[in-house]
């Protein structure tokens, strides 16, 4: 008999390519789906004490899976201080000043949500010193690829003078702006000083945000190492492992480190996460095959030598781990594909599902090679908007400036990737991007460029079935079938029949994780017991 029955619903199981609703009810027992069928069929499974949800035609889908979340970082940003949306340098400095006035004398201060591309002028170490002369302060760029530190922090960090990524003033003095490996080292050391009680609060804050968007599983890309390749401390992993059972979302953990031995000690089946092969366009650290359009003197930065990357990938591959790495530019994608090809050729594995995070600027040859190799890609459709849409204009036009229009137009070619047979799953890159699968679905369905556009069913698959498959979890998640986990999202409208232009605005009415309601937006939904 059933613990919970959902009836009077439009149920999209995601088991058929057409994804047309074929059922109106489902039963849940012990956290798993017991049966799917008609109201009468499922009603017969009710017993005394069964909870019954009457959804009045609302749509039920498998719970959304966000395959790229910096979970701890997202939570810390939500706890603040946060300057997201502040477009003036003076406004950012005012937040710094207020934070300093409230802090304990020995406290390090991290300001989250900064976006150098949106602020009216650059902020330097000297300006930070005026509002924070005695405490170490770091302004963390939202994208994760840059930060700004004041003089106290600069002295505390004691970075090697020849470390890659130390920006300097015309005088030769450090500007306080750090990118590439210098950014990674600085962030690691700052975040390592954060108390674990704050980490716990951050995880729960991020989880509460996730369930409001209908997310029941996050792929948490966490931790790192102090060697300049990772930019978050191992303690993040330890806290998440302790807390994950108490969260209202499930977590799939990716350890952002080159330490294969440590991953095996933690019994983790995955490694890498958003471990940087290259950086990002805005800092001119995304690695390109041809020079940047706005700065022909650089092609970006590869964070590993070929020898280092090949050795790491082969070591993790031989250990049986699934590998995932950040590669945005076409040169980084090329380097990582070569490393994967080399490891698989030397040590064949039939179904490794090694991942490339972002896969932003692949060439047609990269797509063909990834498909042939069985590489999966975790992408962020909310980053694929075009200037013509009028959305995120500053972000998009900046990327046109960096890449030129020809290269910009081959970013995120979802149609080509899907047609090539590559497993592609969707994510947000929170906190660099905003959580919200419906935003990503909307972007990839409505994109004016056909090479970016998918059907509504294909777009939903990125955040359901494909999100499960990319983590080897298709046997327990991603579709609504008997025996699978009862992880569900209830939407006010059916995204397969709604006006495509409204997809991002469909309200999430309820999120159910393991048969338990973890978020409910509409109290008027009828809930009773037999």
Image: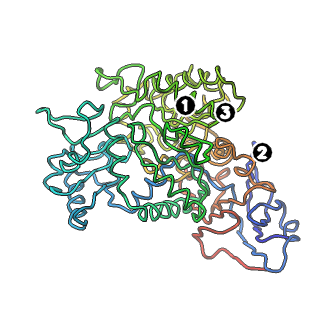
- Precedes in sequence: disc 3 or disc 1: 3
User: What residue is shown with label 3?
Assistant: 352
Residue 375: horizontal and vertical position, in percent?
A: 62, 30
Contact, CB < 8 Å: mark 3 with mark 1? no
Real-space CA distance between mark 1 and mark 2, rounded to the nearest whole angstrom: 24 Å
Most foreground residue, 437 or 132: 132
Q: Is 177 left or right of 4, judged from the image as shown? A: left
Residue 195: horizontal and vertical position, in percent?
A: 38, 61
Q: Is 205 left or right of 368, judged from the image as shown? A: left
Please identify the quarter of the rendering in which residue 184 is found: top left
Query: What's the mark number on residue 16?
Result: 2
User: What residue is shown with label 1?
Assistant: 413
Callout in the foreground (2, 3): 3
Q: Quadrant of the C terminus?
A: bottom right
Please identify the quarter of the rendering in which residue 507 is found: bottom right
Q: Tell me if residue 502 comes above or below residue 51 in the rendering.
A: above
């Amino acid at each position: 008999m059933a613990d919970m029955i959902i009836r009077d619903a439009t149920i999209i199981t995601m088991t058929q390519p057409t994804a047309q609703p074929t059922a109106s009810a489902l039963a849940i027992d012990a956290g798993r789906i017991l049966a799917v069928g008609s109201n009468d069929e499922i009603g017969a499974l009710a017993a005394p004490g069964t909870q019954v949800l009457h959804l009045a035609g609302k749509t039920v889908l498998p719970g959304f899976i966000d395959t790229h979340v910096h979970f701890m970082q997202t939570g810390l940003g939500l706890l603040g201080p946060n300057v997201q949306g502040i477009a003036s340098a003076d406004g950012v400095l005012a937040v710094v000043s207020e934070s300093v006035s409230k802090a304990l004398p020995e406290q390090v201060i991290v300001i989250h949500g900064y976006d150098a591309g949106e602020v009216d002028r650059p902020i330097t170490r000297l300006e930070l010193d005026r509002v924070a002369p005695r405490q170490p302060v770091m302004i963390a760029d939202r994208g994760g690829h840059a930060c700004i530190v004041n003089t106290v922090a600069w002295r505390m960090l004691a970075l090697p003078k020849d470390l890659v990524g130390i920006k300097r003033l015309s005088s030769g003095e450090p500007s306080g702006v750090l990118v590439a490996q210098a950014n990674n080292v600085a962030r690691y050391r700052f975040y390592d000083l954060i108390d674990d009680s704050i980490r716990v609060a951050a995880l729960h804050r991020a989880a509460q945000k996730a369930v409001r968007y209908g997310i029941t599983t996050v792929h948490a890309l966490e931790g790192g190492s102090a060697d300049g390749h990772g930019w978050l401390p191992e303690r993040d992993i330890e806290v998440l492992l302790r807390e994950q059972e108490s969260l209202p979302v499930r977590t799939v953990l990716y350890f952002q480190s080159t330490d294969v031995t440590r991953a095996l000690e933690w019994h983790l089946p995955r490694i890498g996460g958003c471990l940087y092969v290259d950086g990002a366009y805005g800092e001119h650290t995304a690695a390109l095959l041809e020079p940047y359009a706005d700065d022909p003197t650089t092609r970006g930065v590869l964070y590993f030598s070929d020898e280092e990357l090949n050795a790491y990938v082969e070591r993790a591959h031989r250990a049986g781990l699934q590998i995932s790495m950040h590669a945005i530019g076409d040169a980084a994608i090329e380097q990582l594909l070569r490393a994967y090809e080399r490891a698989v050729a030397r040590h064949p594995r039939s179904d490794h599902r090694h991942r490339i995070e972002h896969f932003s600027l692949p060439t047609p040859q990269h797509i063909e090679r990834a498909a042939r190799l069985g590489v999966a890609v975790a992408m962020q459709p909310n980053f694929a908007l075009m200037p013509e849409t009028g959305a995120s204009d500053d972000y998009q036009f900046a990327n046109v400036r960096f890449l030129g229009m020809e290269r910009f137009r081959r970013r995120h070619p979802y149609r080509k990737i899907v047609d090539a047979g590559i497993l592609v799953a969707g994510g947000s890159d929170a906190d660099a991007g905003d959580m919200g699968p419906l935003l990503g679905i909307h972007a990839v369905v409505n994109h004016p460029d056909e090479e970016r556009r998918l059907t509504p069913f294909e777009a939903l698959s990125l955040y359901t079935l494909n999100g499960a498959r990319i983590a080897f979890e298709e046997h327990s998640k991603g579709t609504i079938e008997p025996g699978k986990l009862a992880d569900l999202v209830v939407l006010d409208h059916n995204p397969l029949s709604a006006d495509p232009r409204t997809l991002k605005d469909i309200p999430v009415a309820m999120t159910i994780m393991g048969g338990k309601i973890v978020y409910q937006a509409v109290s008027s939904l009828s809930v009773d017991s037999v």
